Amino acid sequence: MLKYILRRLLISIPVLIGVTIIIFTLTELAPGDVADYYVDPEAEMTPEAMEQLRQRFGLDQPAPVRYLKWASRLVQGDMGYRYVDGRPVAEVIVLRLGATVRLISTALIFGTVVGVILGVFTGLHQYSFWDFGLTGFSFLFISMPAFIAGIFGLYIFSIKLNLFPVGGMRPVTRAPTFWDSVHHLILPALILSLAYIARFMRYTRFSMLEVIHANYVQSARAKGLRERTVIWRHMVPNAILPVVTVIGLSMPNLVVGAVFIETVFSWPGTGTLYLDAVRARDVPLLMGLNLVMAIVILLANLLTDLAYSWVDPRIRYD
Amino acid sequence: MTEKMDADLPAGQEALSIADITPVEVDSPGRRALRRFLRHRLAIGALIVLLVIISLAVFAPTFARYPYEEMNLRDTKSPPSAEHWFGTDRIGRDIWSRTLYGARVSLAVGLATGLLATAIGTTIGALSGYYRGWVDMLLMRFTDIVMTFPSIIIMLTLAALLERSLLNLVLIIGGLSWPPMARLVRGQFLSAREQDFVLAAQCLGVPNRRIITLHILPNILAPMLAQITFSVGEAILIESGLSFLGLGVPLPTPSWGNMLEAARNLEVLQGLPWMWIPPAIATVVTVLCVNFIGDGLRDATDPRLVM
């Protein structure tokens, strides 16, 4: 098992290098460079002075050399400095990461638990009223992007019904209590999880329908086990196996959904930071955030594989 | 031989001759798929709604009651009324007209992007599935990388770094959303290339390019159809998302996404709901219809599925 984890980590390295190359190439596409950013256009720099400045920043060197320099600094944990205020990129990202992790993990737990339960329920009652109703609901939320769901949610629950705050992570006027944090978290996390509830429900329903007629289910019933035991001990554990992979596969979507939900709910996480970086064309910060997201997604894929081997002991890695 | 067979027949029953066989109408796969699709009630309903939306978009100048860019500073922020069906925005533009013209942009971007993704995905998938070997290996690893990384993130970065224009938008979205199509086409090619008609063509010395485009591709169009539909729906969503963040369709042109951008302002969200509800509902209804149609097409073209 340990060997497998190590090998998976090693495989991730070339992918990560590929990602850094893509990120670096993307920023090369951007018009202008650091020198252009720092120099006031009204300062009337002579072309020679600009050239000197570029030399100081090392911008006169060919792209591969600059990539290697950037990469070697990355390995040491140095992501460079923001254009906007000169603060270290790594520090700014770490500061904001907690909020996003809180939002995404709540949404993931919510989406998985509720989605699986609804999926088991609709799978057991195929073609019932609830099956049609919930399948319709899942279609709706798969076709509705997170930000539109967010706008409607904010309008209905925060503005019209006044149940939740209209955004942010904690009250402005006083020190936040635990309840305050939960209160601010519920609506954005719930809305972010809607698409996942829908997706997990559909997958679970589908795989419940596959196991419902399996022989071991019949023999469990024949043994005289209670129906509840048959469902939760025999059917569900087998039905949710394929669903486990979906959790990992939905990670990229969740990260992207968080960018939109954070924007709608003014959530102070990496998503809003990303948009700040985009708007200010803050290249070092953009590169840093892209890299962090890539790492998070690769780790999620790895964890999914491990979780899969944990829930399904038949799978062996050697 | 025939006499013997005749003799074996029970008394009173004659042997069949060719003339007795009434020609059975043979259903072509395309016809059968069409018939199955027409039986899919949800998909047909969705198709009708979508056709209404498309004709509203195409004939926007006829249905719009004001030019979409016309400002009227005496009539701003007014709620829906007889003159302005969907009300007006903060500089007095008619929301109904903007929603109609927005449909044009959103649908056109969605369609163009979906087709671009289809073209790229089909090319990569076809090469990968037909040639296999190292070509397949290389192209599929590339596809995997594009797939694991959330493409919207790269789209956001590109949209931020490049100039905002409709063409760039189509290129960015289409250029990054082809992997599902590539996977599908590759799978289809892998199984198609083992079939006899491909072998026959290869024996006749038909060049590979012709086999790929004229022999195999027409045979796998049916399963591709559903995927094309889904990718158009996906593209409409991505466009509206990027525009919502202020990175999509450049501003004077209305699209559903950049009309929704107004809802990021709390004052608009709270006080002027008619400014964002129409484009929001239009987007969701359109994508829902497209997805229903895609589902119908997938069911209709899947020969294993009994309907």
Image (cartoon, coloured by chain):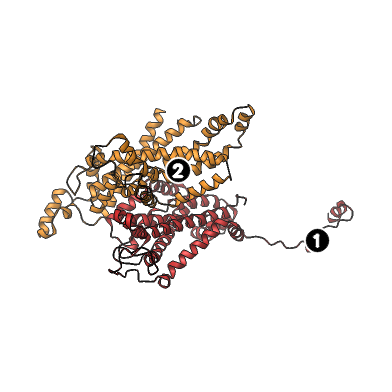
Chain colours: A orange, B red
Subunit bearing disc 2: A
Amino acid tagged 1: Ser
Q: Position of residue B126 (x, y in %)?
A: 48, 54
Q: Residue at x 34, y 60 (%)?
A: B259
Above or below, A12 against B220 in this view is: above
Q: Which circle marks residue A169 in the picture?
A: none
Residue A197: mark: 2
| In this picture, residue B125 sits left or right of residue B239 | right
**Residue sticking out furthest to the bottom:** B62
- The x and y percentages for residue A140 are 47, 51
Quarter the C terminus of chain A occupies: top left
The image quadrant of residue A184 is top left
Of the pair A17 and A61, the residue shown nearer to us: A17
**Residue B272 place in picture, x, y as percent:** 33, 58
Q: Secondary structure at mark 1?
A: loop
Image coords of residue B164 (percent x, y): 29, 60
Circle 1 is placed at which residue position?
B17
Residue B230 at least partly seen: yes
Q: What residue is shown at x 41% (from left), y 63% (from top)? A: B103
Q: Nearer the viewer, mark 2 or mark 1?
A: 2
